[in-house]
Image (spheres, rainbow, N blue to C red):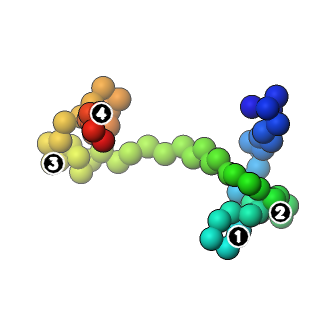
Amino acid sequence: MTKAGVRVMASHTAKALLGNGKVAYVELDDGQKLGADAVILSIGVRPNMELAQKAELEIGPTGCIAVDHTW
């Protein structure tokens, strides 16, 4: 991505996305404000499957709720 001119800032945390109707700036944990045309966030989350399992929904091969091509 960096070869294509994308700035990767993995050592910082986004504190706020600022703008009016669309993101114009990203405020970082160290106070920097960066102008942005697009923002990609990579957030690590894991689904809570307890409710799906209690409801006896079909669980797919990834351990999440099974879906098909229509979803």
Distance, label 4 to label 3, CA atoms, is 22 Å
- Residue at 82%, 36% in the rendered image: 5
Distance, label 1 to label 3, CA atoms, is 41 Å
Is the C-beta separation of discs 2 and 4 under 8 Å? Answer: no
SS for dot 3: loop
SS for dot 1: loop
Q: Which residue carries the number 4 mark?
A: 69
Give the mark nearer the N terminus: 1 vs 3.
Answer: 1
Is the C-beta separation of discs 4 and 3 under 8 Å? Answer: no
Between 67 and 32, the one lying in front of the other is: 67
Between 45 and 3, the one lying in front of the other is: 3
Residue 32 horizontal/vertical position (percent): 85, 61
Residue 2 horizontal/vertical position (percent): 80, 32
Say which amino acid is labelled 1.
Gly
Residue 28 visible: no
Distance, label 2 to label 4, CA atoms, is 40 Å
Distance, label 4 to label 1, CA atoms, is 35 Å
Please state which of the two labelled residues, at mark 1 or mark 2, is closer to the viewer.
Answer: 1
Between 34 and 21, the one lying in front of the other is: 21
Say which amino acid is labelled 2.
Lys
Give the mark nearer the N terminus: 4 vs 3.
Answer: 3
Examine the rendered structure and indicate whether residue 20 appears above or below residue 47: below
Please state which of the two labelled residues, at mark 4 or mark 3, is closer to the viewer.
Answer: 4
Residue 34 visible: yes
Say which amino acid is labelled 3.
Ala
Q: Which residue carries the number 3 mark?
A: 55
Please state which of the two labelled residues, at mark 2 or mark 4, is closer to the viewer.
Answer: 4
Q: Which residue carries the number 2 mark?
A: 33
Give the mark nearer the N terminus: 2 vs 4.
Answer: 2
